[in-house]
Image (spheres, grey):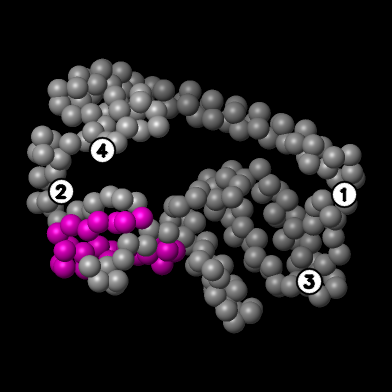
Amino acid sequence: MTSDLQFLPTDPQFQLNPYPWLAKMRQETSAFYDTEQQAWMLFRYDDVERVLSEWKTFSSKPPKPLDREDFTQTLPFTDPPKHQSLRAIVQKVFTPNRVEAMASRITELTHELLAQLQGSLADRNALYAAGHDLADPYLSPLFGDFTRGFPPTFLQAGTRDLFLSNAVRMHRALRKAGVSVELHICEGMPHGGFLGTPEDAELAVEVDRFVAAHWGCKTAS
């Protein structure tokens, strides 16, 4: 297997556009073994269809016991006839109409839980401060002095980020001080990002561009 067929799932460029690599795999190899994930990958329709249909040859059971034995009896890790019996139970409960009926309650619960989490932020801030003034710039850069040669800054947040307000305030403070700053806000993103989604990959590309523009180098990613 040549190095140009290397699987790089965490590479931002790969996440943004994996299709040339997938096309190359379909053309040059029927199966690919990724040593890091210890898993086989198939790319051609006929091969995928065969694996999914010939369960006696290509079992869904894990090759070794998982950390939690209960997981071996769930849908992804069982073969017929156990798989059919589990699926029949699930299908009776999760019908399209029942799922649709639960949508409003799920949304309501989500907002309630997020409100509780936001409400507990003050207590967490106090714990973090350990008795010190929360306006101390060593605790929060929001209260720092940005007029003394503060470097260009890249800020990112999401609409589900508990610190979205702080990110916006930081952006305005830096702008007021004449600092070159960019603020990127992603829809639905929590604090720290989604960890592996296309939105994360897009942000990584933006960071690379920002670093290259201001310091002429690339990030470790």
- The residue that mark 4 highlights is 63
- The residue that mark 1 highlights is 135
**Circles 2, 3 touching at the beta carbon (< 8 Å):** no
Residue 184, image x, y percentages: 59, 60
- Which one is nearer the viewer's eye here, 27 or 203? 27
Residue 144, image x, y percentages: 85, 60
Is residue 190 rendered magenta in the image? Answer: no
Residue 169, image x, y percentages: 75, 55
Q: CA distance from mark 1 to mark 2?
A: 58 Å
Q: Residues within 10 Å of mark 2 (few under 14, many from 20)?
A: few
Q: CA distance from mark 1 to mark 3?
A: 19 Å
**Residue most extreme to the front:** 64
Checking the image for residue 48, the label placed there is 2
Is residue 19 rendered magenta in the image? Answer: yes
Is residue 171 something that shows in the picture? yes
- Which one is nearer the viewer's eye here, 118 or 18? 18
Q: Amino acid at mark 2?
A: Val
* Callout in the foreground (2, 3): 2
- Say if 23 sits above or below 33 in the image: below
Secondary structure of residue under mark 2: helix
- The residue that mark 3 highlights is 150
Secondary structure of residue under mark 4: loop
Q: Residues within 10 Å of mark 1 (few under 14, many from 20)?
A: few
- Answer with mark 1 or mark 2, whichever residue precedes in sequence: 2
- For image coordinates 25% across by 38% down, the residue present is 63
- Answer with mark 1 or mark 4, whichever residue precedes in sequence: 4
* Callout in the foreground (3, 4): 4
- For the record, the magenta segment spans 11-36
- Say if 115 sits above or below 47 in the image: above
- Answer with mark 1 or mark 3, whichever residue precedes in sequence: 1
Q: CA distance from mark 3 to mark 4?
A: 54 Å
- Say if 164 sits above or below 64 in the image: below
